[in-house]
Image (cartoon, rainbow, N blue to C red):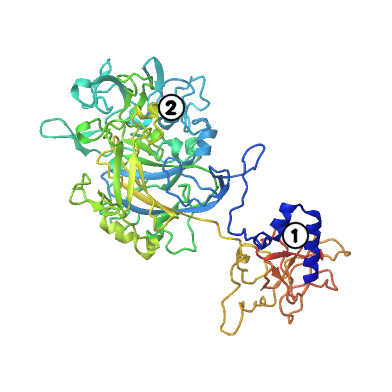
Amino acid sequence: MRTLFKNALAALLVTGSAPTLAQVASPQLLCQDDLANDKQGEFKIGPDGLTVSNNTIVLRPDNRLQLNTNLKKLDSENISFPFDQTVTIDYVYESAGASHSLGYMYMDDVKARGYADANGNLVDKNNNGILDLHEALYNLTPDNDPVLPQTYIGKRPRRCDKTFTSGGFTYQQPELAMTDACKNAFRTVPEFPGGEIDVAVDTTDARPGRTGGGNNILADWVGTQMPLGVNGDGDPDYDDPKELSGGDASDQGLFPHIPNLLEPAAPENGNLGMGRMVFLLVDDDSDKNVFRKLGPLTDQSDDNDGVPDYNVSEYDFRGLKLPKDPTDPDWDKINTKDRRVNLGLVQGGKEIIFFGVVYYDSRHNIDNNTVAPCLKRKPYKGIPLEDGKCLLHLRTSVSVFFSKATWNLDQNFKQPADNKVSERNIGCDYSDQCNSPTSGKACAIDGTSPVQKACGWLEKATLQRLNTAAYQNLSMPKERVTVMRPGTEVGNPQPAIDKMNYMPHVIVGAPTTDPFRWILGFEDLNGGGDRDFNDIVFITRRRAPRPRTSASRPWANPRPSAPPMGSPAGPRTPSGPVRRPAVPSPPSPIPSRWTAASSTGPASTSPTPIPPGFRWSSPRAARTPPRKWRSTSWRWASPVRSCAGRWTSAARASCAVPSSTTSTSATRPCAPAPTRAPAPARWATSPSGA
């Protein structure tokens, strides 16, 4: 080695220039340590650069690549996952006089149906002033519309065929806002049911700064105030709503009072539903009441225990009824497993939009912090007196609120100086007496100096329940979460969105104590109500899919799974290196599953053919360790970890070709061969190709 070094140095001295000689002579450059330096070059993503099939890799501003672990605060305006993940939803809490259902849908489905453009913005293709998604939601599109491919979401014939004209456009009257008698519901005086007039109604303007009586506007109304009791003065009593029949406020779908568009596809909605229902009834209270009997199910429990008041397990992740499971003795019982719904494997890059269906009468009453939904608004033109003005209000007992604020129908009539719709301390106990950060009920926000405070979000009992084994002991830190007015984000003001006064209805608590769980809370009143955002609360938890094991592969050898690459192979013992427990042999006898042929013998007669490249072997019962499959390109290797980074074979035993071409039930056959690419942590490439 010393001679070789001298020869190499001599060659450098002969061929190099004077400055080079000086540099070569420097011992620092001859043995320079660059391991601590980031030498990654610049990357480019695009047609002439890298191709990334999903957003697992992101391009940093300095043109370097970074793994997208999704460990970030959730943006309720864009809920997606960078790679395939298993997602579950856990029920947490409900506190409201209304009744609710909770569901979700994929943005890809909304785009495919033509309701949103490539950027996810809702569109109005027929230019009648109402966004196409909202038309489909309440079935407002007339049958003769020449533009929209689906004029009715549901099973025909249409139950009610009444139309109305507003602003020069004709629409269908919405069944979800009408009685079973199909009585005309257009231009009904909002405060007095049944009084039909022929002119637009004098209406409180719900835009910020214009809610005073002197700023009233004329707006059309559609929808019926469902029956109410009468107070002592003979006026309608909004605190005394009457129960409805199945045909009232119904579009006759899979669930009578959930918009057909949001139901899972089923014959009852003409297979045009594109939603998935997670919790059909979000009730957990001490009674069995459902508002006006509008919920899709009856309330079956009066226990206030953090479990929905119906048997969630009777329905699949789409909300469709399952057949009875005869193997489960608790199948028809409400228990703690009904807290969770498994959405299954959610594809990476697919955006999810959550929605809450709220069964409660909408009131246009600013003094009560509520407004009626607005179906049609004047677009932004830079004219303050006209921008965002509501032209057509909807009176309904079935409202829908989306996690994307710009998809909501109601207006936000408040505009505080800081543009905050609401701000909450997620680890602080909720109090209905806390209305501002200066309240004595507000809690200090961790890490703020000088100390800043915010009102609490969840009730104390709920916070305590989250910190139990049932919820993996989630401790909520005293951290701030803020909901801003859409279009007013710092550094990205968007007047065209801001002036529409969209009302957000979802707040996200993303505790730093558990970045894999997001807590979402809904506000359930049109216009925002008390803006506590805790009327419906649930947790989403996501994890990467588990690697396939022998239990999920019928062809796999019955043996413990190998550890992931780079992980210890087993427990360390005081006496030596890493060891794995002995691999148990499969029980004998094992019935023969295949009838196999040798490479030169007759063809297989088994119903399941042997995959190409593999051969059958029949190990003797006494042989240890059990034989494994070998192929022309892959082989099983015994569980001994090598420093080269793959599983090697310390004592390989190949499957010898049996003398007979047919395996019998008296012998133990090797496991059937895999039908897909082997898992890299358990297979090794045979260098010899044997």
Q: Which residue is rendered at x = 25% and y = 30% of the image?
A: 364
Q: Which mark is residue 131?
A: 2
Q: Secondary structure at mark 1?
A: loop
Question: Which of 57 and 104 lies nearest the eye of the viewer?
Answer: 57
- Cα distance, mark 1 to mark 2? 55 Å
Q: Provide residue 240's location: percent of width, then percent of height.
A: 20, 39
Q: Provide residue 203's location: percent of width, then percent of height.
A: 24, 23
Q: Residues within 10 Å of mark 1 (few under 14, many from 20)?
A: few
Q: Secondary structure at mark 2?
A: loop
Q: Mark 2 or mark 1, which is nearer the start of the sequence? A: 2
Image quarter where the N terminus lies is bottom right
**Side of 441 relative to 587 (left or right):** left
Q: Residue furthest left?
A: 232
Q: Nearer the viewer, mark 1 or mark 2?
A: 2
Q: Provide residue 634's location: percent of width, then percent of height.
A: 75, 63
Question: Which of 505 and 38 lies nearest the eye of the viewer?
Answer: 38
Q: Which residue is rendered at x = 67% and y = 77% of the image?
A: 585
* Residue type at the position of mark 1: Pro
Residue occupied by mark 1: 607
